[in-house]
Amino acid sequence: MKKSLLLCLLSGLSLVLSLRVMAAAYVPPASPRGVYSFNPDWKFIRQDVTNGDAVDFDDSAWTTVSTPHTYNDVDSYNNLINHSGGDRHAWTGIAWYRKHFKLPVTAKDGKVFLEFEGLKQAGRFWVNGKFAGKYENGISGLGLDLTGLVNFGDADNVIAVKVDNSNDYQEEATGAGFEWMGRAFNPNYGGLNHDIWLHVTGKVYQTLPLYENLKTTGVYVYPANFSIPNHTCDVTVQSQIRNESGDQQSITLTAVVVDADGTVRAKFASEATDLVSGETEQVTATGPLTGAHFWGLDDPYLYDVYTLLTVNDQVVDVCKIHTGFRKAEYKGGAGTGGVWLNDKFVWLAGYSQRSSDEWAGLGQAYPDWMHDYNAALIRSTHANYLRWMHISPQAVDVRAFDQAGIAEVCPAGDKEGDPVLDHRLAPATAARQWDQRLEVMRDSMIYFRNHPSILFWEAGNNGVTPEHMQQMVDLQKQWDPNGGRVTGCRTLNDPANTHIAGYFGVMIGQDRRTDALTSPTEMFRAYSAERRDLAPLIETEDFRDEAARRFWDNYSPPHFGFKKGPDDTYAWNSETFCLAAAERYNDYYRNRISNTDPAHAKWSAYASIYWSDSDADGRQDSSEVCRVSGKVDSVRLPKQAYYVYRVMQSETPDIHIIGHWTYPTNTVKTVYVAANHCDSVELFVNDQSQGVVTHPLNGYIYAFPAIKFAPGTIRTVGKAGGAVVAQDQIETAGPATAIKLTPHTGPEGLQADGADVAFFDVEVVDAQGRRCPTDEARVDFKLTGPAIWRGGYNSGKVNSINKTYLETECGINRVAIRATLTAGTITLQATRDGLEPATLTLDSKPVKIQDGWSRELPAAVAFATPADN
């Protein structure tokens, strides 16, 4: 009784404390600014039309879609890949989008903007029949000022967008193509394939960080004067303010720094600034932050920084920046060099990835929560680094990486090398293509400079001239001088760049398969030591090898290993792929900059290409519909390499048995175990020891030869200092008896917004529910309810996406559905003759859409709002 009373008192106290915390949480003052999702309820047609920009054009027969949307989800991953780049049969050309929307009367006296986080490739925009702007580079975010073009109240508005993703698209003003148009560099997922936001502000406002079209720079937040031991720094807010009120205004900028619990940790203000109507000015405020919780890779702590504008003590605008504060240093010199965050050396390890970051069956258009899912999956391998390839990443991925603690390399846009060095190009075209790259780099710096996860700006995927490298560095000095980042390039072969770049990126920088380094060139050897003394050296894309998930090893049915064809470069199965990957990773890790041997220490970062299989390019031409270099496949199902990288990149003991334990009778094979931070590894078959190995291959792989298969359990134990520190085991699966479905949705369930996705693992299991690892046969699906079937894919079969049947691969596959704008009950059934079927039911949840926009932001955006909000 006394215990119950005590529990009641503690519970009551907890409630009171919780209410006090809730009451103390900062609530920003009201202002005219509002940000709304403009994603839902567009009309779409995949063809060119006449007068599609006209207000009275009849679009009633067009398809209803929501953004992010692509029209290449239905024809990618369909054909064999070739090295020249991607799916050769993805549709390209002109398509149209239209949306009807209304705006409240309360917005009439303010400003109205649209923010497109990007689209592919080019767009022309009309609002109520009037031309509103154009877009051509296919990378940058874009802003439109709709203020003078829209109606308010009950009057209808129409926005029309003409999108062109033709592979030979050329810039309208100059006739120059964009060098990154190749499918291998910016995979072609045409359409409004990013989030779109509606911004409403007053006439005195802070601009958006959208230089493309709007020519505005938004809010820039950065820390300085760090004391890491004392947890202090200064925070500066620089905001571009515009006065369109019709009169001169005296404006004060105030910054409020709020921690993750909602507590105000700092507040400071600028002097008042007088702006005449039509004037734009940068206003700066700086103040101290004490008790600072710094952003780090293992502790990615984020603050909300509110920036308030006041006129005559009245708040007229409030923006919110979701950001983190970290001290970053980029040092040269063996032993003490490398990348340092918050006064500590960090070993960066992870992957390279195409910025399209697509899923088979969905393309580049999938909801925000799935980007968060992907980032968490990357982080679950203990990776903390990703180098995006060729073009700047999607804003939604940058937000996800801020939250997950993954350092990023952000390129501008390129193909290979500096266009002025390409003598096939006319000089005017080459010069214009370089300027296009500079413009994208400028736009990306402005758009992403508040994101702590971006550490590196990349000037090119290959060497650029010293003059052009200097231009990129000067861009950073202009637009991101205080963000704690450096500008460099992959493969800077000209020694003159040594004293310009802030880091040096390489590709396959330790390739020992030939007498000379494959890349960079022999010139790299001559001055790599000087580079190392000046700035960090980072691997940007190593281990280009490929292996599809479905090939276990040489002893597993139905494939019994990969059978190399005449057009295939590699012959790995899942097992041998892991062994080769471990050898490569170990070669870098043992020579990292923090190594105690200065003669060998040089590497600050390691990136293995790719993270997930991609419909980009590939060298398995005779057998694959995508490039299969990934550690997960293109629906993010892990390969065995996923677990091996998890082990290798772990800072604590970890262990994994490579493969499965369901083999044909009389199988005898070498069993490989990946382990880290172990002095010894012992293997057991049905509790019978198969020996102890103390000397791994390549640093991580422990080999147990001539192990005879016996049904039951295989188990491995890793020890350090005589104590067990890691274990793993696998059981033999029996005959297949049933199909199992496992759903995955966003944090609030499937949203009926027309763009949300649910995906399902489909497994074939035995009577005990164990996955049958060698199962590979057809499963049929039936979907009912308000959803669109998106399906999945089979990595080795053409035309497998969007089908209502798929084969399992290694006993599992994954399929997806897309929500419509109608909420309701959805049922998915999976069947195969001879197996117990699986049926799963879920309800899509209604989303309030008002006049073409929604106050309900896409799932997972609560912690990562767009642009400057």
Image (spheres, helix red, strand yellow):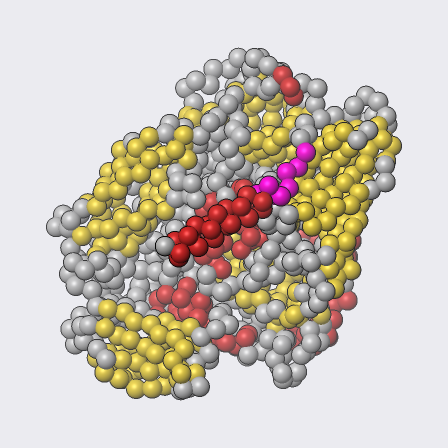
Is residue 372 at all visible to an observer of this figure?
no
Rendering coords of residue 642 (x, y %): 41, 64
* Quadrant showing the C terminus: top right
Q: Up-down: is 500 above or below 198?
A: below
In the displayed structure, 618 sits above or below 36; it is below
Answer left or right for 293 relative to 2.
right
Q: Is residue 764 above or below residue 649?
A: above
The picture places residue 626, in percent across and down from the top left corner, at 40, 53
Q: Quadrant of the N terminus?
A: bottom left
Q: Quadrant of residue 789?
A: top left
Q: Nearer the viewer, residue 353 or 510?
A: 353
Outermost residue on the left side: it is: 834
Compare residues 330 and 177 and report the one nearer the observer: 330
Identity of the residue drawn at 87% across and 32% down: 274
Q: What residue do we see at 48% from left, 70% from top? A: 650
- Residue 782: percent from left, percent from top: 24, 38
Q: Residue at x 22, y 54 (%)?
A: 764
Q: Which residues are magenta?
A: 22-29
Q: Is residue 609 magenta?
A: no
Looking at the image, residue 820 sits to the left or right of residue 95; the answer is left
Count of number-bearing discs: 0
